């Protein structure tokens, strides 16, 4: 007599059991394949994912793109601007025609040019994507590494270790980060740790963002570890004679991969915004290196004559942050269907 | 509709419910029809995935707004549920048909007093009833379902009640509008045996006194047996059998019903009977396989193999494998004023000897300390007091590091096969881990041993690289058993190994455990709440209550002639398959309670 199979995880779902029973066709598929199937159906998440991939490609191939479609990002084109107001001319051959309300958008300059210096905006946006994504991604990796290690240690060992780490998290979260960043960037020398100029400044930005945002991930990892270590499979491993190292690396960490992956995708846009904010305040990366925040800051002086100069970097930040958020939400729903629907 | 017969209060005709999923449409209910007359009792029985819960949700019109695709007729008190507007549907729920859900911990709102919730349940449908009047009605309803001091308790919050009492409150809530039908979906599955018996008695009494129809949905034939007149047996969304409860249970027609009935463990069957039956079945199967293997195989190996399966009777003086003396476990419970902690003894003063090759059953209700005890024997918990000796060595307080070699000898099978396997680790790795942590480094050897064992517990060796989610509950429990076996332990502690499984799967797992005991000369400690299961697998039984052993002895004599009052109560409360016997036991329970009062 074959038993009507009770399906995987029916005990944890509120869905009617027969619906779950249908999932037994899932036999040969891994959890990741199932998640991918679910993700494919999520149009919004997919759109976010595609934009994210495009952005990454744009950042990687910035030199190629600018070589084909634009000009070097730091090349001045002052013949395009009105030397008196700094605004972009409608027709450089004939300055009498006045300023261009579209900021010089033409087949030559896909997104127009900057006021005052006449640098190609397309190239600067593309190079700005490099800076933004580099800083945000590396900072996120720093967050994840610190957060995961300390979170697992706090959750698994508990006791006074947990108390110390948890209080440290509280302190880090209460830190007036922006003020600290402004102060720190103000006092750094021109060269340190073998880095100089913008290399050093990027390093400092990554350090500030990564080192102060880890408690967000740390708390999530600690919470997950606390519940995971009470699960029966951990007890089962202990009863087989497994030690702490085995339990942490083989039993607990694999179950943390998904939440960490999802959360880091959602942390990247936060870090992009933070980097933009620092650059906007002038404590980020020095000109002439292109950053979206820095461009916005420059643009504020010209918003009456060259509104495109405000809109384009603003839009770049907006689209990037939105795409990462949609992608992250999509990932979370795909891996954990209980959180949505 | 005929004039003479009472008009059915619930009529379901050719009901079909389908859900769209990633893997295509799932037909959860496929052409189900039944009727319940006013004051009648219908049981809907089926294993998980049979569509019984989907049916009960459909009766309440609770699939509205989900992706379910429903066709067919559902009539409740003359109204077609599928055609009602949302407003009419809300008027029907509670008023004509009330539902009692499985988990009483989740079906009451934690932030309101039960009085508020009962009053609300009435005034939603009868806004003209005054608050004071509704309150009076609520007190009556609470009294009706047997809540002591209803006038006082009406102001309590749900967390101030035990699970059984909460389920009574939920039932009282269902009674507020005097519905024509009470729909109870697994109302006792989350409860202990004695509490379950009381709730079933209450439902039966209410049905008789108030003339209310009862639809009882359950996975357990024995739960339904004594409480309904008619029963529908469901499988894969289809009613395989429908009829009078006595006929269906005594002369089942459909092979599925027969198999289901055969799989239900019966409290009157002794260990010896069950074992003899299992061994006979197995020998039969082996012979069949040998015949199938054909004449090509030699006679000699077949005989040899058969000899290996012969039962090994204990010879002479029985050897003590494990000795527990005065074992206790204390937990500190934080709470109370100023966060002062109080002591709570989960287990206190438990002593027993465990002999080689026997099965010791530990039976008790929730909170009896049976799981704590098994974790102490396993040394996952360190006993607060007392002494545990394994093969003469004191293991009560030895360090984890020194415990490690001993872990080879004592293994555990956990209750929930869904949480005892790591979802991110393949089955092969999960089983092989044991060899690896015990120092084996040869990957190919590990794989070979794991595959042999998978085959032994009835799984495909080729499933080595699959993840646990691809297996059903019963298969997962087999994997968990394989994991416990791989170190060739002397003692396996089974902590409720079959309570999360369907009856037929449960039967297969019990058979497997019994075969393995024969083959490997294993000793078991078998912890469970189900009296019938414990009887069939145990040579000796310990009955636990509130952390102490109430009775310990030979399993047959405990079940035939219980010495303690508590054991007797437990046995009286155990659900039985025979409807007439169930009614007798119920009458006895009612008499006993009347005597107490």
Image (cartoon, helix red, strand yellow):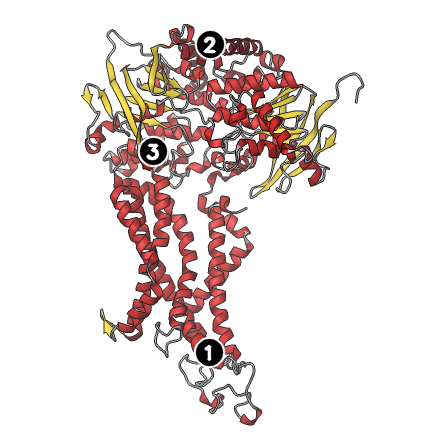
Image coords of residue A334 (percent x, y): 49, 48
Q: Position of residue B576 (x, y in %)?
A: 52, 13
Q: How many angstroms separate mark 3 from mark 2 (CA)? A: 36 Å
Mark 3 Cα-neighbour bin, 10 Å: few <14, some 14–19, many ≥20: many
| Front residue (pair B565, B65) | B565
- Label 2 marks which chain's residue? B
Please identify, in this view, whether the residue under mark 1 or under mark 2 is nearer the observer: 1
A313 displayed left or right of B303: right
Q: Determine which quarter of the picture holds residue B372.
A: top left
| Front one among B300 and A167 | A167
Residue at 43% over, 14% down = B278
Identify the residue position indicated by label 1 in the image.
A299
Tell me residue B78's x, y (percent): 74, 29
The answer for how far apart the CA atoms under marks 1 and 3 are is 63 Å
Q: Which residue is mark 3?
A: B431
What is the total number of numbered labels drawn onto the structure image?
3
Is disc 1 placed on a helix, strand or loop? helix
Residue denoted by label 2: B268
**Residue B357 higher or lower than B416, as above or below:** above
Q: Residues within 10 Å of mark 1 (few under 14, many from 20)?
A: many
Q: Could you tell me which secondary element the residue under label 2 belongs to?
A: loop
Q: Is residue B365 above or below residue B155?
A: above
Checking the image for residue A106, the label placed there is none
Residue B93's place in the image compared with B588, above or below, is below
Q: Are marks 1 and 2 on the same chain?
A: no
């Amino acid at each position: 007599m074959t038993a009507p199979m009770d399906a995987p995880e029916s005990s944890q779902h509120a869905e009617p059991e027969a619906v779950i029973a249908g999932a037994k066709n899932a036999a040969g598929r891994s959890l990741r394949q199932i998640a991918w199937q679910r993700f494919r159906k999520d149009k919004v998440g997919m759109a976010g994912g595609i934009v994210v991939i495009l952005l990454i490609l744009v950042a990687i191939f910035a030199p190629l793109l600018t070589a084909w479609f634009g000009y070097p990002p730091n090349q001045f084109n002052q013949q395009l601007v009105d030397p008196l107001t700094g605004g972009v001319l409608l027709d450089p051959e004939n300055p009498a025609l006045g300023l261009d309300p579209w900021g010089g958008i033409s087949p030559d300059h896909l997104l127009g040019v900057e006021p005052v210096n006449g640098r190609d905006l397309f190239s600067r946006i593309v190079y700005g994507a490099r800076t933004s994504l580099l800083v945000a991604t590396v900072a996120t990796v720093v967050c994840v590494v610190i957060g995961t290690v300390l979170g697992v240690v706090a959750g698994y060992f508990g006791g006074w270790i947990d108390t110390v780490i948890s209080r440290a998290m509280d302190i880090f979260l209460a830190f007036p980060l922006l003020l600290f960043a402004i102060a720190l960037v103000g006092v750094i020398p021109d060269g340190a740790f073998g880095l100089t100029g913008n290399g050093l400044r990027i390093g400092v930005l990554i350090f500030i963002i990564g080192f102060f945002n880890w408690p967000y991930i740390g708390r999530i990892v600690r919470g997950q570890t606390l519940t995971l270590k009470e699960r029966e499979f951990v007890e089962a491993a202990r009863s087989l004679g497994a030690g702490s190292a085995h339990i942490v690396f083989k039993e607990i960490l694999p179950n943390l991969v998904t939440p960490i992956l999802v959360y880091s995708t959602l942390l990247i846009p936060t870090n992009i915004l933070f980097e933009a904010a620092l650059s906007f305040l002038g404590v980020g990366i020095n000109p002439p290196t292109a950053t979206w925040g820095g461009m916005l800051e420059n643009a504020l002086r010209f918003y009456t004559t060259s509104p495109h100069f405000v809109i384009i970097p603003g839009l770049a930040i907006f689209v990037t942050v939105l795409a990462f958020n949609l992608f992250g939400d999509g990932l979370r729903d795909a891996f954990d269907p209980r959180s949505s629907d | 509709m005929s004039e003479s017969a009472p008009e059915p209060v619930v009529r379901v005709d050719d009901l079909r419910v389908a859900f769209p999923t990633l893997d295509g449409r799932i037909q959860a209910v496929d052409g189900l029809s039944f009727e319940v007359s006013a004051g009648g009792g219908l049981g809907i029985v089926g294993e998980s995935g049979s569509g019984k819960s989907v049916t009960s949700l459909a009766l309440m019109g609770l699939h509205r707004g989900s992706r379910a695709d429903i066709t067919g007729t559902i009539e409740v008190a003359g109204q077609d549920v599928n055609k009602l507007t949302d407003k009419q549907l809300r008027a029907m729920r509670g008023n004509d048909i009330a539902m009692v859900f499985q988990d009483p911990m989740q079906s009451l709102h934690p932030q309101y007093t039960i009085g508020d919730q009962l009053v609300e349940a009435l005034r939603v449908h009868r806004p003209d009833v005054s608050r004071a009047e509704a309150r009076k009605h609520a007190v009556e309803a609470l009294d009706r379902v047997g809540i002591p001091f209803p006038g006082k308790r009406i102001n309590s919050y749900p967390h101030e009640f035990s699970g059984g009492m909460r389920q009574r409150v939920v039932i009282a809530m269902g009674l507020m509008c005097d519905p024509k039908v009470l729909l109870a979906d697994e109302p006792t599955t989350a409860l202990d045996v004695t509490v379950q018996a009381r709730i079933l008695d209450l439902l039966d009494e209410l049905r008789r006194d108030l003339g209310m129809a009862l639809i009882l949905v359950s996975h357990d034939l024995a739960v339904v047996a004594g409480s309904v007149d008619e029963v529908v047996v469901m499988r894969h969304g289809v009613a395989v059998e429908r009829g009078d409860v006595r006929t269906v249970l005594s002369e089942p027609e459909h092979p599925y019903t027969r198999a289901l009935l055969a799989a239900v463990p019966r409290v009157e069957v002794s260990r010896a009977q069950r074992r003899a039956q299992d061994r006979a079945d197995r020998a039969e199967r082996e012979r069949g396989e040998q015949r199938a293997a054909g004449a090509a195989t030699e006679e000699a190996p077949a005989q040899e193999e058969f000899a290996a399966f012969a039962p090994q009777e204990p010879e002479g003086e029985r050897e003590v494998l494990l000795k527990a003396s005065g074992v206790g476990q204390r937990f500190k419970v934080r709470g109370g004023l100023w966060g002062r902690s109080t002591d709570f003894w989960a287990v206190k003063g438990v002593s027993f000897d465990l002999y080689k090759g026997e099965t010791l059953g530990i039976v008790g209700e929730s909170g009896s300390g049976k799981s704590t005890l098994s974790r102490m024997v396993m040394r996952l918990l360190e006993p607060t007091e007392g002494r545990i000796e394994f093969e003469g060595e004191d293991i009560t307080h030895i360090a984890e590091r020194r415990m490690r070699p001993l872990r080879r000898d004592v293994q555990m099978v956990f209750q929930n096969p869904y949480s005892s396997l790591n979802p991110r680790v393949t089955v092969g790795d999960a089983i092989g881990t044991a060899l690896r942590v015990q120092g084996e480094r040869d990957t190919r050897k590990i794989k070979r041993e794991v595959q042999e064992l998978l085959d032994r517990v009835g799984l495909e060796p080729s499933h080595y690289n699959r993840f646990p989610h691809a297996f059903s509950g019963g298969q997962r429990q087999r994997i968990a058993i394989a994991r416990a076996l791989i170190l060739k332990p002397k003692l396996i502690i089974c902590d409720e190994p079959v309570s999360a499984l369907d009856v037929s799967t449960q039967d297969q797992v019990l058979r497997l455990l019994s075969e393995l005991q024969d083959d490997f000369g294993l000793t078991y400690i078998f912890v469970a709440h189900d009296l019938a299961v414990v009887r069939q697998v145990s040579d000796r039984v310990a009955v636990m209550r509130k952390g102490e052993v109430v009775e310990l002895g030979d399993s047959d004599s405990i079940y035939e002639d219980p010495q303690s009052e508590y054991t007797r109560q437990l046995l009286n409360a155990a659900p039985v398959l025979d409807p007439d016997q169930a009614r007798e036991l119920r009458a006895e329970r009612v008499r006993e309670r009347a005597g107490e009062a």
